[in-house]
Image: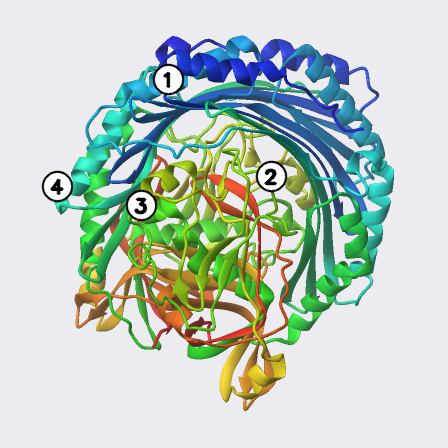
Amino acid sequence: MTEDIQRMDLITPVEKATRLLSQKDLDFYEAFASHSRSVRVTILGKGIKDTGSSVDLGMGVRAYRDKGLGTAYSQSLDPADVERTVATATAYARVAQPDPFFKGIPAAPKAPDVRFLFDQEVTDLGIESVSGFAKEMMDAVRDVRPGPMCEGGVSVGSTSSYLMTSTGVSVEDERTVLSGSISATYRQGEDIGSSSEFEYGVSLADVDFGWVGKRAGQKAVEQFGSRRVGSAVLPMILVPEAASSVFFGLMMAISGEQVVKGRTFASGLLGKRIAPDWMEVCDDGRIAGAVSSATYDGEGVPTKMVSVVTAGILSTFLHNSYSAGIAGVETNGHAQRAGYGVYVGAGPTNVVVKAGQSSLDEMIVETKKGVLVTSADFTPSPVTGEFSSTIDEGFLVENGEKRHAVKNLMAGGHILDLCRNTDMMSKEGRTFGKGHFFPSMRISTIRFSGD
Amino acid sequence: MGLSHLTLDGHLLESAVRRGTEQGASFCEARFFEERSSNIVVENGVAKTLGSGIARGVGIRVIVNRRWGFASTNRTTSEEVDKALSDAIGGAKAIATEGIEDAQVVNQKSASDSVTHKAKVSPDDVDPAEKVRVMLELDRIARTYSDKVKDTFTTYRDTVTTTLVHNSFSVRVEEVTPRTYAYCRVISREGTNLQTGIEYGGGVAGFEAVNRLQDEQFSRKAAEKAVKLLSAHPPPTGTFSVLVDHRVGGLFMHEAFGHNSEADSVLAGQSIIADKMGQQVASEIVTIVDDPTIPGNGHFVYDHEGVRAEPHMIVRGGVLVGFLHSLESAAKMNVQPQGSARARSHQFPPIIRMSNTYLAPRDMAFDEILQDMKLGVYLTGMNSGYVETQKGQFTCKVEQGWLIEKGELKDHLRDVSINGLTLDALKNISAVGEDFKMDSPGTCGKMGQGIPIDAGAPHFRIDGIVVGGRQ
């Protein structure tokens, strides 16, 4: 990307927008602009399929009048488009009706920078380097076993953004991200071994592309010989990749307006026990060098570390200013802005689950009969908390040993049962995006549907 | 009140294609995309947000030295499009020469056409205040259905998408497509028991789509569903015969089978039917079609490679007879493309996508199918689904179900999902009904690209499906 890097002036159009908004008899307003560049290489089949690069820029405007919200965005920062965007948002604000829950948008406290969210080395990467990483992943898959068919790719990008509001917020942000992912499929007669792996980070050193390919290949080979198993109530062991969906499901259910308006299964759980007293979960948006970190959240409020599950008790919800206003508390810096597309919600940043005392090997050894899950999505219905999920990749465990891969198997239940029935947590785990951390965990009983 | 239509200098694409071939591209495609949208969010009787947006830009795709290169920009000046062309060519040239899939495309006939799908009532001609009034009324119907209704969310969205495709085969086609949607979500409550009911509708149409949904009382149906689910039970677990409605059936056809028929997955060794052309892959009562030419959310006249769309027969009488193709897969498999390549926007290259995918109806009445079932589950309404094409394993999450005992519908069920192995499931389709419907307008995600699709089916029965739950 080297020769293409040029700092886009986001401040001038945003200032123009806010100047125009200030003349429109609004209660609150904000303008946000971003500019990003990305380069990607796609892998499909036996090799690299194509390369791509894109430039994305745009501006979003939010205008509040009598508690009604009008929004508009445009993928252009040209002065005429800025004027049109402001005019549309303002006109819509006059048609929108008062939202009784809206209290205002936050002011502008300052916070020290979260460091290492931008790496110049990543912005300097060209297509040659990126395709080299893709080739490294493919070669690693082939080294595990010849003849793989693959799907995946490598992507690198940088984004700069600027937010300015009527309450004095003026926040610039600049970040990089790179990622590598690959799924590997091997065939052995009619038998298929298939799996995938990924990693992402801020800096080049965060992603070992050879490791990603090797892991995908090794996991794929382990899937040969998968068999159906019968319906039963059994213990379930989750590796970090599978455990992550349990905690993300919980985090989404305790985030933003839905939880404070009583619309999720977690709405009445603040201050209540939801897990064993040794379970600790925090959300930390200030981890240096993590993809999900930021100095300020999507509304320009400083991010912070919050303890979410303390000694098994749900100790806080994750707020933006809107949900905090409803709950009568201060926002804890979890507003999330989806680019210039004007939607601002709330959600987790880096989810960190405290490691336990056990190990994955101990969990397997101590399980007479159960299922080891290496890939599955347990994200529940946010309203009911119920889930019914396919075990995408897993193994039958018998007498303390992995027996064979499973297929055509589902697990069902309530996400709170997964939390409450966790009886072992490993001391080792996996860090994702240099911020999230999940150990392996064992759930004492869960209902499986199979043959 | 929407943002004004932004035009593009027509010569910009043409000159980009010309410069691309002059600079050594054996194939060059320049595609303009613009999407104007507006939306309304009504929550519990309050139209609290009105929004509008415009996305636009140019995507350039080239083949240089048998390598693909792609670049996009949303700055539609001559200078920026030139830069995107240079990036695309530079990207193709920069890829190492080993470990690469050779790029090629099938030759196209030159074409020049412009298609505008007419909206009976253009959303641009409807005053935002009138749109708000209609959505408030739909929301009111849901909100007042029962005192067990806790919350209602009724949303509206319209888009007008303009796509211009120019390529080095002298293809120059333009298509302007309006789409209008409404969505209603209701949360019901009884004590601590919360349930959700959802209804939605719309597609390639103007504001008349919302008027039609109003006539069908779609928001009342969402509320009725949410309230009735309060007394439903979790499903039994195990392997059952399942009877599915047009929405679950459409989801099954799309997820479990449709993705396997996309020729890019076939060529990449990611499809379980890659080597099964001409073979029996399903019960002989199964005929599966993907047809962009019929009304539905996946309707279009030209795909995003400028190929005129035709119906795609995939399975006839249980035998695999076709895959879905792009210019590239058609070249590699020596067939003619029928228009299946689409892109989410200018920021992505076209890839092979389904459009309106369906199981063709046969002749059984719903009651006939039901009567044959001693023990099973009847499933209606789709939530979501996904497939691992390379393994042939699918998962469908459905809205609700009923236990079937001795040919009768019994207990009402909630939080139901099904899982199966595609080829086993297709061979185990044992009855196909006559009551065809297609009204599942949705968005299908693939390789980071969400694209409008639809899916349909009559009622049909599949034996040996795993039903997941907590009972």
Residue at figure coordinates x 51%, y 36% from the top left? B343
Q: Given this view, does label 1 or label 4 mark the residue nearer the observer?
A: 1
Q: Given this view, does label 3 or label 4 mark the residue nearer the observer?
A: 3
Q: Are marks 1 and 4 in contact (CB under 8 Å)?
A: no
Whether B464 is drawn above or below A299: the answer is below
Residue at figure coordinates x 60%, y 41% from the top left? B301
Residue indicated by mark 3: B267
Query: On residue A143, which mark appears?
Result: 4
Q: Are marks 4 and 2 on the same chain?
A: yes
The quarter of the picture where residue A277 lies is: bottom left
Residue indicated by mark 1: B89
Query: Which residue is situated farthest in the bottom direction here?
Result: B406
Mark 4 residue type? Asp
Q: Is residue B66 found left or right of B178 in the rendered image? A: left
Percent of width and height locating residue B405: 54, 88
Sequence-wise first label, 1 or 3: 1
Q: Chain of mark 4?
A: A
Percent of width and height locating residue B124: 79, 34
Residue at figure coordinates x 21%, y 73% from the top left? A368
Query: On residue A345, which mark appears?
Result: 2
Q: Are marks 3 and 2 in contact (CB under 8 Å)?
A: no
Mark 2 residue type? Gly
Is residue A373 or residue B260 the one in the foreground?
B260
